[in-house]
Image (cartoon, grey):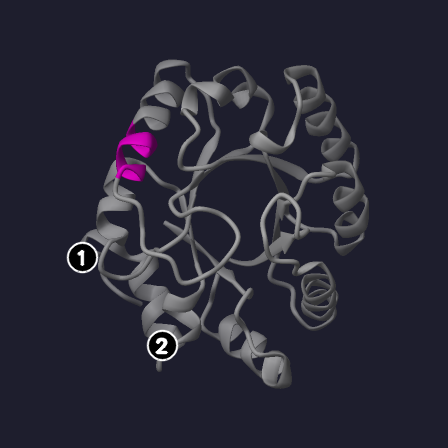
């Protein structure tokens, strides 16, 4: 299991120190939550661009950019310069299937992996046809737009469904899960078939980043190293 640490709720006055603590605790990725104030209520564009640029300058750990925005192409252009590992956009933000395909190809042209996110109320069936062309599907286990929400238990079934579809069709698409994830529920998430978990408050608010990140990585009682 890989861990992508959300920096959404990192305080600005000690952000660089916090980024260093996250890095030395061996997170796999830094998760950048970009919200435009339209697709979701909050607007984090300026803060996340600053954080992404700062992390890129001080760390070699890859960035995962998660676009919770209406104008997807605009924000691809804004964040592709940060050379993220992956850019994920929401299928609910795109008007039709042809536009989804265009955005997938557009991100790939930037030498970047592609993810498609689905909200809690969206069926995973909506992304089936795109799975052969993307690197990751991100299951939202909270409603996008703010941190600190509780994990929606129905997400477990969605993870299982998409995992079975990926296996049945011999695909290599990874499954990410984002929202309300902590050391108490990560075992169930891994057992359902997740490859990457996005955690924010569970890490940022913990006293020991090393222990928390290792515990999230080593679900099912695996040895913590």
Helix, strand or loop at label 1? It is helix
As drawn, 58 above or below 185:
below
Residue 1 numbered mark, or none: none
Which residue is identified by label 2? Answer: 206
**Front label number (1 vs 2):** 2
Residue visible at 45% across and 63% down in the picture: 200
Residue visible at 69% across and 39% down in the picture: 70
Residue visible at 65% across and 18% down in the picture: 96
Q: Nearer the viewer, residue 54 or 42?
A: 42
Residue 47 lies in what quarter of the image?
bottom right
Residue 124 visible in the snapshot: yes
Question: x and y percent of residue 110 in the render?
Answer: 78, 38
Q: CB atoms at circles 1 and 2 under 8 Å apart?
A: no
Residue visible at 47% across and 27% down in the picture: 172
Q: Nearer the viewer, residue 124 or 17?
A: 124
Q: Nearer the viewer, residue 61 or 175?
A: 175
As drawn, 34 above or below 50:
above
Which residue is identified by label 1? Answer: 221
Indicate the quadrant containing the C terminus: top left, top right, bottom left or bottom right.
bottom left
Q: Is residue 159 magenta?
A: yes
N-terminal of the pair, mark 1 or mark 2, is 2
Question: x and y percent of residue 32 in the render?
Answer: 60, 57
Question: x and y percent of residue 12 in the render?
Answer: 63, 79
């Amino acid at each position: 299991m890989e861990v992508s640490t959300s920096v959404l709720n990192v305080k600005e006055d000690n952000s660089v120190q916090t980024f260093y603590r996250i890095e030395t605790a061996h997170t796999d990725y830094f998760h950048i939550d970009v919200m435009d104030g339209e697709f979701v209520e909050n607007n984090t564009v300026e803060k996340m661009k600053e954080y992404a640029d700062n992390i890129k300058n001080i760390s070699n750990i890859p960035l995962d950019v998660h676009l919770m925005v209406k104008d997807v192409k605009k924000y691809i252009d804004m964040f592709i310069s940060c050379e993220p590992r992956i850019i994920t956009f929401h299928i609910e933000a795109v008007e039709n299937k042809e536009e989804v395909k265009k955005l997938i190809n557009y991100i790939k042209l930037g030498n970047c992996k592609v993810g498609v996110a689905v909200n809690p109320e969206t069926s995973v069936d909506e992304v089936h046809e795109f799975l052969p062309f993307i690197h990751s599907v991100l299951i939202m286990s909270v409603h996008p737009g703010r941190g600190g929400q509780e994990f929606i238990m129905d997400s477990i079934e969605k993870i299982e469904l998409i995992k079975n579809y990926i296996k049945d069709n011999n695909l290599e698409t990874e499954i990410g899960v984002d929202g309300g994830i902590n050391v108490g529920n990560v075992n169930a998430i891994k057992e359902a078939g997740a490859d990457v978990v996005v955690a924010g408050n569970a890490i940022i608010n913990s006293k020991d980043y090393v222990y928390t990140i290792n515990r999230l990585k080593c679900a099912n009682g695996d040895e913590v190293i």
